[in-house]
Image (cartoon, rainbow, N blue to C red):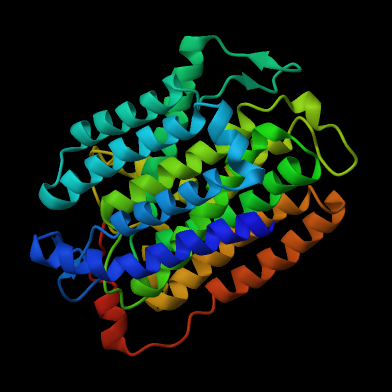
């Protein structure tokens, strides 16, 4: 645990310390989100914060490569190189998009390229727990992996609509995933889970390091550079765990061997996935481009109900923690306890959502006027 915590702290520290430098760079070279009618932020704000997060990630990976517990991952496998290749492509794509803006088809093509490069180099779903263990052929493996990565990238990109929202949700989700992958990697000795454990803990680190600069009122946005990278990393960590570990090897008294490795990634990504699905259905039914921005995301609806930006963000954090935490709890406690905890948490959250604090009429009107995307 100490080595993982050391990597987390290193990633968080580098991200935190380099974010002001990236902020100044973004302002000087015009990587700035101007205020539009559909935006929540009231003044021009620099973006490109994903660059600082990338530096934190690279620092954490470099440190991990020198530590005995994780050194074998870098010595014997191609997965770290695959991960770095995918990150490099998605960050370059994000930088261009944050500066000039890209059409949806071009952005989608870049995302497919990043996902495909990772898949061809080894970060790919190779089997599924269907009828025992169903091994995928190489082409299906790559295509399925690309689909998962695309869904994850765009889910996080869509949810990035309020200060601190995407970074906080990913930190909570990755923390939950780390708890389970750590159980497999360290407690049960499943070596294939080591990279998933490392990536998830580094995700927590870079998000924690970035959040002080990004919470309401944000000094800098992560931009598509950051949101797409977070989505890709979250997908990579779940793929290296759920898609590459034989479920039959996980039999034990504290684990549901055939279901939990598949259900946990869905639970971890539940809130962004629901938001993505609702957005695609909503826009398609209206005859619009599924990637066209609107003002009806889950967090926007919380604003419409009268919740402040900060409160809406905390509620979204809580929903993510409830769903992901319940799934992880099944690995550690009897399922009846996990379900009972979920029921209590669900009741409390419904109560909070339905009881927004009273706000001045002018403030509510301002919140209803728009969104970032």
Of 85 and 329, nearer the camera is: 85
> Residue 77: horizontal and vertical position, in percent?
55, 27
Q: Residue, x 23% and y 72% (percent of image)?
A: 41
Quarter of the image for residue 188 reads top right
Q: How many marks?
A: 0
> Residue 356: horizontal and vertical position, in percent?
48, 80
Q: Residue, x 62% and y 35% (percent of image)?
A: 72
Of 336 and 99, nearer the camera is: 99
**Would residue 87 be found to the left or right of residue 182 on screen?**
left
Quarter of the image for residue 120 reads top left
The N terminus, quarter of image: bottom right
Of 207 and 270, nearer the camera is: 207
Camera sees residue 344: yes
Q: Is residue 316 above or below residue 98?
A: below
Quarter of the image for residue 373 reads bottom left
- Of all residues, the one furthest to the bottom in this rendering is 360
> Residue 99: horizontal and vertical position, in percent?
13, 51
**Would residue 118 be found to the left or right of residue 3 on screen?**
left
Q: Is residue 317 above or below residue 176?
A: below
């Amino acid at each position: 645990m100490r080595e993982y915590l050391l990597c987390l702290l290193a990633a968080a520290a580098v991200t935190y310390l380099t974010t002001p430098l990236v902020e100044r760079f973004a302002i000087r070279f015009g990587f700035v989100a101007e205020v539009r009618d559909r935006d929540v932020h009231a003044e021009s704000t620099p973006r490109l914060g994903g660059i600082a997060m990338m530096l934190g990630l690279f620092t954490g990976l470099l440190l991990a490569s020198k530590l005995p517990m994780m050194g074998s991952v870098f010595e014997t496998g191609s997965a770290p190189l695959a991960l770095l290749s995918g990150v490099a492509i998605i960050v370059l794509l994000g930088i261009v998009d944050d500066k000039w803006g890209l059409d949806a088809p071009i952005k989608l093509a870049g995302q497919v390229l990043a996902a495909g490069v990772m898949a061809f180099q080894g970060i790919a779903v190779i089997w599924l727990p269907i009828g025992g263990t169903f091994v995928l052929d190489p082409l299906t493996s790559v295509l399925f992996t690309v689909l998962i990565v695309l869904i994850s990238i765009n889910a996080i990109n869509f949810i990035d609509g309020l200060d601190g929202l995407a970074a906080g949700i990913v930190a909570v989700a990755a923390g939950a995933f780390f708890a389970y992958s750590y159980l497999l990697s360290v407690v049960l000795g499943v070596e294939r889970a080591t990279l998933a454990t490392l990536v998830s803990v580094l995700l927590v680190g870079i998000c924690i390091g970035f959040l002080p600069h990004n919470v309401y009122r944000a000094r800098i946005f992560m931009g598509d550079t950051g949101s797409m990278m977070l989505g890709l990393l979250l997908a990579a960590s779940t793929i290296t765990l759920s898609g590459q570990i034989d479920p039959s090897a996980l039999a034990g008294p504290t684990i549901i061997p055939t279901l939990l490795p598949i259900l946990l990634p869905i639970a971890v990504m539940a809130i962004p996935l629901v938001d993505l699905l609702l957005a695609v259905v909503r826009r398609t039914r209206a005859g619009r481009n599924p990637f066209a921005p609107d003002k009806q995301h889950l967090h926007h609806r919380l604003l419409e109900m009268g919740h402040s930006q900060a409160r809406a963000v905390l509620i979204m954090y809580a929903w993510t923690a409830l769903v992901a935490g319940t799934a992880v709890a099944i690995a550690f406690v009897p399922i009846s306890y996990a379900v009972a905890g979920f029921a209590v948490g669900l009741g409390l959250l419904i109560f909070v959502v339905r009881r927004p604090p009273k706000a001045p009429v002018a403030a509510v009107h301002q919140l209803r006027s728009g969104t970032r995307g």
